[in-house]
Image (cartoon, rainbow, N blue to C red):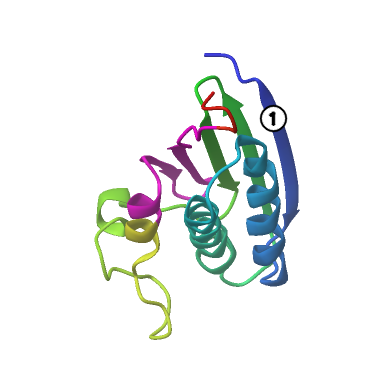
Amino acid sequence: MKPVNTATIEFLSRSANEGFARTAAACFAAQLDPTLDEITDIKTAVSEAVTNAIVHAYPDRLGRVKLKLRLFEDSLLEITVQDWGVGIADVAQARTPLFTTGNEERSGMGFTIMESFMDTLRVRSTPGKGTTVTMRRRIARRLTAGGK
């Protein structure tokens, strides 16, 4: 399946860039004419994925985070967040609700939240090499004036 539009943004793993990433994703998704609820879901999922990369992938240093946005036919949005950090030893365990490698301030709900707001979630990781999170969401087509 070939995308009809793409955008890629790379930034440092600074917490200030989480807001930038979620806004960029929302702006890119806007071309599909999503509802406010759909935009909120997308922003929340991106926020969780980027925060995971910032907090867990690079716990003691700055690193790179890449946000890749792709649109496909039939209003399918694909969002990929990639890092080259510490990686995840056990992805299944990391996807378990309440599991966290962070401190007591972390809820351990990041992957659960991403999964609940997107249609699909795929997590690939290699310890010492990084993690790639790919999320997809189909945006419902809305009727325009005249019923088309």
Write down the region rendered in magenta.
114-143
Within the magenta stretch, is there residue 110?
no
Residue visible at 30% across and 52% down in the picture:
90
The residue nearer to you, when weighing 50 against 148, is: 148
Answer above or below: position of 113 versus 107. above
Answer above or below: position of 119 versus 111. above
Residue 17 location, x and y as percent? 71, 64
Residue 64 location, x and y as percent? 69, 53
Say what amino acid the circle numbered 1 marks: Thr
Residue 93 location, x and y as percent? 25, 57
The residue nearer to you, when weighing 38 against 52, is: 38
Answer above or below: position of 113 versus 2. below
The residue nearer to you, when weighing 19 against 96, is: 19
| Left or right, residue 135 beside residue 81 | left
Among all residues in the image, which is located at the extreme front?
Answer: 146
Residue visible at 49% across and 32% down in the picture:
141
Picture quarter containing residue 9? Answer: top right
Mark 1, residue position: 6
